[in-house]
Amino acid sequence: MAAPGKRLPQAEFIALMAMLFSTIAFSIDAMLPALPEIAADVSPYAPNRAQLVLTSFVLGMGFGTFVTGPLSDAFGRKPVLLAGVGLYILGALFGALAQSLELLLAARLLQGIGAAGPRIVSLAIIRDLYAGRTMARLMSLVMLIFSLVPVFAPALGALISHFAGWRGLFASFVIFALISALWVGLRQPETLAPENRRPLAPDTLASALCAVLAHPVVRRAILIQSLIFGALFAMLSSTQPIFDITFGQGDNFPYWFGGISMVTASANVLNARLVMRLGMRRMVHRALIGGLTITGLVLALFAARLLEGAPALAAYVLWQASLFFMIGLTLGNVGAIAMEPMGHIAGMAASVIGAVSTVAAVLIAAPLGLAFDGTPVPLATGIFICLAGALLLMHRIRHEPDGEA
């Protein structure tokens, strides 16, 4: 067992945090190649609804996030994290047995609620131990390892579903979660001392909630994160149907997606090197300008139907790669900007920030995914609006006090 107060070596700590983060990516990306099989099995008359297995998981994660942080502030990081992993495993078992789309979505919702444990508690653990640009740099390194998951997850998901069907994916989720739980239980010390814990009382929670939402930088960072997450989840929901139906690349989708993810993983390396010199705010502002410009160009090309065949596929691949690259330069930094003033209530802050941004992102992403009409135009339109709003808000944050962040 891990000795209380003993800090893990940084390399192992980064790897462990990355694995906990990867619970989310693996649970989403491994499902992508199986969407047609899921649609044929449980939603044959409305195949586009199969993508709701992605957004229902994200929605559950958002709801779970509301309580995970306060619970970890009251009872410690490790017990709440391990309880979340247990709930995630229970949801995965129910998902493997689901016989209808409605039951499958309920199982994914439960699985998402459990996934809030690894997601939020790992953020709180990082904030317990690090702050400022050092925290941002460590987050970038965690995200670098985390970003490798989408490279392999779709291909692994396709392989598992080929031999074991889409239900076999849920067995792989159970195995992945058990490994994470054992690693945390045996190696990661508790990072929240008993004297620093906050009682789980309504007045305490209300005061912490007010403190988070009253801070102008944190409030705007939450909105920015919501819009960026919304763009990301919309892209993830629509990308398999676009590759399959629009471009006829369904069989090659895992390789396209893995290649794109491999290229865009370099964004986290770039961010880790530049954030200490440029600061988080300038990095996010510049990345959003680049993402908005490219998205506007792609939207114009597809809306005007100026591209067809291979050129259209190339434009879509380059756009998706640029969007993922932009997200690699923004999400970790935006999260660090939001958490920086909240060190005294890190668990509650992580919950509020994560919950609001995740639920809001689902409200953005689900309609965009269901609006798929055989072309990338609805998706590109929605993402352009998201990035424009995020850029306007980020411009306001750059002129707030503490601009050195």
Image (cartoon, rainbow, N blue to C red):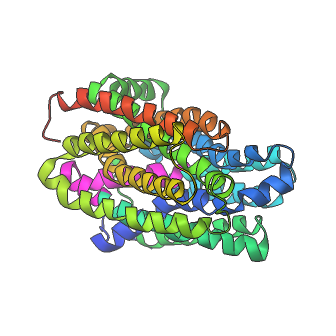
- Above or below 3: residue 50: above
Name the foreground residue: 240 vs 104: 240
Q: Residue at x 28, y 24 (%)?
A: 216
Image position of 166 with respect to 376: above or below:
below
In front here: 211 or 102? 102
Vertical side of 261 occupied by 386: above or below: above
Asked where in the image residue 270 lies, by quadrant, the reply is: bottom left
Q: Position of residue 248 (x, y in %)?
A: 67, 60
Q: Residue at x 52, y 32 (%)?
A: 360
Displayed quadrant of residue 286: top left
Residue 244 at x, y percent in the picture:
67, 57
**Depth check, front residue: 272 or 47:** 47
Residue 66 lies within the magenta run: no
Q: Main secondary structure of the magenta part?
A: helix
Residue ID at (29%, 39%): 289
Q: How many numbered badges does the structure rendering display?
A: 0
Instruction: Specify the quadrant that holds the C terminus.
Output: top left
Q: Position of residue 242 (x, y in %)?
A: 62, 51
Left or right? Give the position of 205 relative to 342.
right
The segment highlighted magenta reads 116-139
Q: Is residue 204 left or right of residue 140?
A: right
- In which quadrant is the N terminus drawn? bottom left
Residue 189 visible in the snapshot: no
The residue positioned 71% from the left and 62% from the top of the image is 34
What x and y, as percent, mark residue 162? 75, 74
Which of 55/127 is in front? 55
* Res 195 seen here: yes
Q: Quadrant of residue 175?
A: bottom right
**In the picture provided, is 217 more to the left or to the right than 162?**
left
